[in-house]
Image (cartoon, grey):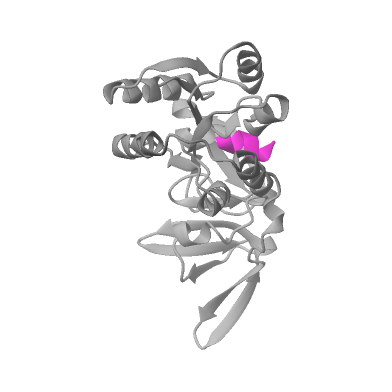
Amino acid sequence: MRIVIIEDEKPSARRLKRMLAEIGFETQVMLHSVEEAIAWFQGNEHPDLILLDIQLSDGLSFEIFDQVEVNSAIIFTTAYDEYALKAFKLNSIDYLLKPIDDEELKTAIDKFESNKSIPQNLQVNLEQIKKLLINPLDKNYKQRFTVKIGQHLKMISTDEIECFYSENKGTYIFTSDNRNYLVDKTLEQLDPVLDPTNFFRVSRKFYVNVNSIKDIISYTNSRLKIILNTFSEHEIIVSREKVKDFKNWIG
């Protein structure tokens, strides 16, 4: 079976190649950008299977298929855990959520091996995923949160929120008027309801509002430190694995 890996992070591509080798599959070639992939597909026989990252260094990988008709099956290797997965569930494209697990990779390959057929609606799948990624505003995100203060309920607009953070097993809203409110959701439960245009999860403990970022500072180990307009109770550090996506998010 001929396999091509399209992944812009070379260490991740090499790791994926090693994982495939460990379960008995050889990678034909590794590609690292939209431009490189287009050139390769235009001049080479297409593989049986593509392991495809969605966001590459020079754009979304869907741009490859705008330029070249690719007749290969695709397994997505993606960090997107909401928009893309919704589209995957509508159709039969397989996916691996980063960081990729050995067993999940083997299961995905076994699934492809057992089917040995390319979905007829592959282009439809790609267009659905692309639409969900590029047009996240098509979804209705929460515009306000309600918190309980004593016997009262207070409504907080998302425009007022500088960040969400977790501490001592609780999740808190911090607002631009320098107040904290306990909210009855975990950060994981906030993932599907926050507008990704405005909010980004920079680490396990923090979601930040782009409109509240005052400064971004280089930090140790290739990380970034974020300074918000008002919040100063804790340091907000963008974890290493999030730095690239964060930079893309802020444009």
- Name the foreground residue: 72 vs 176: 72
Compared with 199, 226 (above or below) is: above
Compared with 47, 128 (above or below) is: below
> Is residue 31 found left or right of 62 in the rendered image?
left
Q: Residue furthest top?
A: 43
> Is residue 178 found left or right of 223 in the rendered image?
right
> Is residue 211 found left or right of 175 in the rendered image?
right
Q: Residue at x 50, y 43 (%)?
A: 93
Q: Quadrant of the N terminus?
A: top left
- Secondary structure predominantly adopted by residues drawn in magenta: helix
- Name the foreground residue: 244 vs 136: 136
Q: Quadrant of the C terminus?
A: top right
- Total marks shown come to 0
x then y, percent, for residue 178: 60, 62
Q: Which residues are magenta?
A: 245-251
> Is residue 14 found left or right of 160 in the rendered image?
left
Q: Is residue 14 visible?
A: yes
Q: Quadrant of residue 56?
A: top right
Q: Residue at x 55, y 58 (%)?
A: 192
Q: Residue at x 66, y 27 (%)?
A: 69
x then y, percent, for residue 139: 67, 59
Q: Is residue 21 magenta?
A: no
x then y, percent, for residue 33: 60, 21
Q: Quadrant of residue 27?
A: top left
Q: Residue at x 37, y 33 (%)?
A: 113
x then y, percent, for residue 123: 64, 39
Compared with 133, 63 (above or below) is: above
Q: Is residue 223 visible?
A: no
